[in-house]
Image (tube, rainbow, N blue to C red):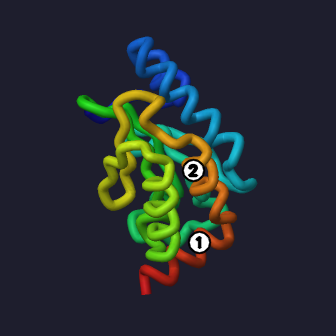
Amino acid sequence: MQSKATSVQQYLSELPDDRLEAIEAVRRVILENLPEGYEEAMNWGMITYEVPLSRHPNTYNKKPLMMAALASQKNHMAVYLTGVYADGESRSRFVDAYQQTGKRMDMGQSCVRFRKLEDLPLELIGKAIAEYSVDEFIELNERIRS
């Protein structure tokens, strides 16, 4: 269920109340932990946290590098964590820490799905967001592209 919203505020205004509360709470955690230099934007029908093209224009698809994203899908909500996907050590740490929370983990490659806010370990999401400075994330991206 991809949104056609062109701004974060429009995206949020289109959410049902129960989803709005959860998405806003996760968004707060992301923004509180987001290293300097990333920008919040709408891309791919989601709220994204990305490296601006002015900082790193050499991307494979000519779009900003997406470090994270937040979305309300048809049957769930999701946080996309590109660093956790791209870095095996980061993924191992994240999965281990998630399992230690006792919360049910529903995770794809980079997508952490949740139906209720209580299902998501917000502190762990914050740590995953804070893990990569813009420079470190660009370096990670370049390393996996080569």
Image coordinates for residue 36, horizontal then vertical, percent: 75, 54
- Amino acid type of disc 1? Ile
Residue 54 numbered mark, or none? none
Estimate how packed mark 1 is, as few (under 14), some (14 to 19) or many (20 or more) residues with alpha carbons within 10 Å: some
Q: For this view, does 3 lie left or right of residue 59?
A: left
Residue drawn at 35 percent across, 42 percent down: 113
Quadrant location, the C terminus: bottom left
Comparing marks 1 and 2, which lies closer to the viewer? Answer: 2
Q: Secondary structure at mark 1?
A: helix
Furthest-right residue in this view? 36
Residue 138 numbered mark, or none? 1
Inter-mark Cα distance, 1 to 2: 22 Å
Image coordinates for residue 45, horizontal then vertical, percent: 37, 38
Furthest-bottom residue in this view? 146
Image coordinates for residue 122, horizontal then vertical, percent: 56, 41
Residue drawn at 42 percent across, 21 percent down: 19
The mark nearer the N terminus, 1 or 2, is 2
Q: In the figure, residue 60 lies in which quadrant?
A: bottom left
- Is residue 106 placed above or below 75 in the rendered structure? below
Q: Secondary structure at mark 2?
A: helix
- Amino acid type of disc 2? Leu
- Is residue 5 placed above or below 138 in the rendered structure? above
Q: Which residue is the site of mark 2?
A: 124
Residue drawn at 45 percent across, 67 percent down: 91
Quadrant location, the N terminus: top left
Q: In the figure, residue 128 lies in which quadrant?
A: bottom right
Q: For this view, does 129 lie left or right of residue 79?
A: right
Image coordinates for residue 88, horizontal then vertical, percent: 44, 75
Q: For this view, does 50 lie left or right of residue 18?
A: right
Estimate how packed mark 2 is, as few (under 14), some (14 to 19) or many (20 or more) residues with alpha carbons within 10 Å: some
